[in-house]
Image (cartoon, rainbow, N blue to C red):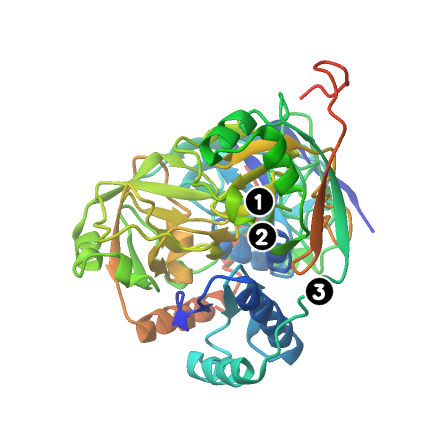
Amino acid sequence: MSRGPGLRVVTGGLLTTVQDQGRLGALRYGVPRGGAMDRFALYAANRLVGNAPDEAGLEILASEVCFEVLQPSLLALTGAPIEAYWNDAPLPLWTTILARPGDHISLAGKRHGWGARSYLALAGGVEVPVVLGSRGTHLSGRFGGLAGRVLRAGDLVMLREQPNDPLRRAGQAWPAEARPPYGPKPSLRFTAGPHQHCFGATSSEALAQAELRVSDHANRMGYRLDGHTVELTRLCSLPSLGVLPGVIQVPPDGKPVLLMADAQPTGGYPIIGVVCAPDLDVAAQLLPGDSLQLKPIGEDEAIEARRNYARWKATPLEPDDTVAQLALAGG
Amino acid sequence: MQPLGEGALLLECTPVDTLTNRLMLALADQVTALDLPGIEVALPAWASLMVLFDPLCLTRTRLEAVLTALVREVEPAPARPARVVDIQVRYGGEDGPDLPEVAAYLGLSEAEVIALHTSQIYRVMMIGFAPGFPYLGPLPAALDLPRRSTPRTAVPAGSVAIAAGMTGIYPARLPGGWHLIGRTEAQLFDPLRDPPTLVLPGDGVRFNAEAQRRKGAEGSDE
């Protein structure tokens, strides 16, 4: 089925991995959901190139990265507003392009105020073995993705299937208004968690008013947040229970931890709140030192947020003629 | 039963004991068997159940009603384990560096700690923390002690540990706060195996003390 190599990694960057929408089915084996940190951006990149939404693409942590294109390929780079090039010309983001053999796609690693992770989808999808129901890389477990590791110079990114009518898709752009509310200092909406009895009566409000920062202890498992200490009214020793990305845990030191894609599936710290799924993709675009706020909302608002999110995912894609010419012309 | 965000429900039960664990396991199986559109996954833990669902497809009120009905009817999973997995353990020495401290804390000899640890069949209450890490219990009361005050940044793979009324096995090199009393060669997790874990919730685990070997007599390099 494989159609051979689509890209050669020239510069692998800090943390470039194969990811998809994760492996929910393996939670019961103690395996994290994993998958893309910014699920929306990968979803959009896949749609832009005509892939199924659960197809695997590349997650690229903001750094200098370069790929050489090895066969004619429809590509789309989404996520962080990163400085990126198609040969010598700026690469249009959230846009389908048709790249030719010998072309170089490079990311300069420079961000414009915000952004942490970019997603590169290739028409046909990335060919790596499915492990426990997913092609995503589980780095600490060293499985999934490309041999369970980050991509390095010299690696070949194999393509899975023949794409459908590639020319029709070139030039498609994802409308800016149909994306999560990305930006600097985001306000992440959360609903109250189940262990309010462990916290002071005004703990949630205090958390919401705090100027929070992503600490240096931040990775694909979770972000420890600086800037506020949550008041724990008593020592809450909980038996380990199921948790999920978005959960805000409070360890005994009161420093909240926001669980992200590779969070372990069980945890024993009290949960003060849960960031709604759409805003977790916004959180995925934060790096250590970035500011954020947490905003308490009710369940209805969280469901409405999901409804909008579903609407954005289904946004109609129409090729823009000017963009299409650019997308075909290359740099 | 409480929401855990807009797309999950958490059912927490007391007391935290084996019967509750058997109920959670049975409940998880029943929720999965419902095959109700909108339910994504049911994850049992020691004394809780997390159900992930799509709130645009299934309302929380409806899911709660379904779960409440199941809770009323559910029969606990069998007390008797479907199978018992034997795990060979080298206790003490470099393999179980905390054994002397544990014995001193509990007022027992090292041999008594080993005898107690190998004296019964434990139930796999849940898999969590890391791929393939089994939470086993209940531990004999004489072995109950709190977690280490300072967790280790790296615990060797295969370490057999106790803490807080539980015993467990580190499937890989991981950070950990439990007391290390021994080590096994058993491979707890292999992503390419089906199932990937050596044991599953509801299984029994029996530890067997391997004859003590002299330091350096075997070839493990970790």
* Chain of the residue under label 1: B
For the residue labelled by badge 2, is the local secondary structure a helix, a strand or a loop? strand
Query: How many labels sit on residues?
Result: 3
Three-letter residue code for mark 1: Thr
A46 relative to B118, above or below: below
A141 relative to A284, above or below: above
Q: Position of residue B68 (x, y in %)?
A: 48, 82
Q: Are marks 2 and 1 on the same chain?
A: yes
Q: Position of residue B64 (x, y in %)?
A: 46, 80
Point out the image quarter for the N terminus of chain B: bottom left
Three-letter residue code for mark 3: Arg
Can you see residue A111?
A: yes
Which residue is denoted by mark 2 in the rendering? Answer: B137
Q: Residue at x 49, y 48 (%)?
A: A37
Q: Residue furthest right?
A: A1
Three-letter residue code for mark 2: Gly
Which residue is denoted by mark 3 in the rendering? Answer: B80
Q: Are marks 2 and 3 in contact (CB under 8 Å)?
A: no
Point out the image quarter for the C terminus of chain B: top right
Camera-side residue of B199 and A98:
B199
Camera-side residue of A17 and A31:
A31
Mark toward the start of the polypeptide (2 vs 3): 3
Marker disc for residue B167: 1
Mark toward the start of the polypeptide (3 vs 1): 3
Local crowd size for mark 2, using a 10 Å CA cut-off: few (<14), some (14–19), many (≥20): many
For the residue labelled by badge 3, is the local secondary structure a helix, a strand or a loop? loop
Residues under labels 3 and 1: Cα distance? 19 Å
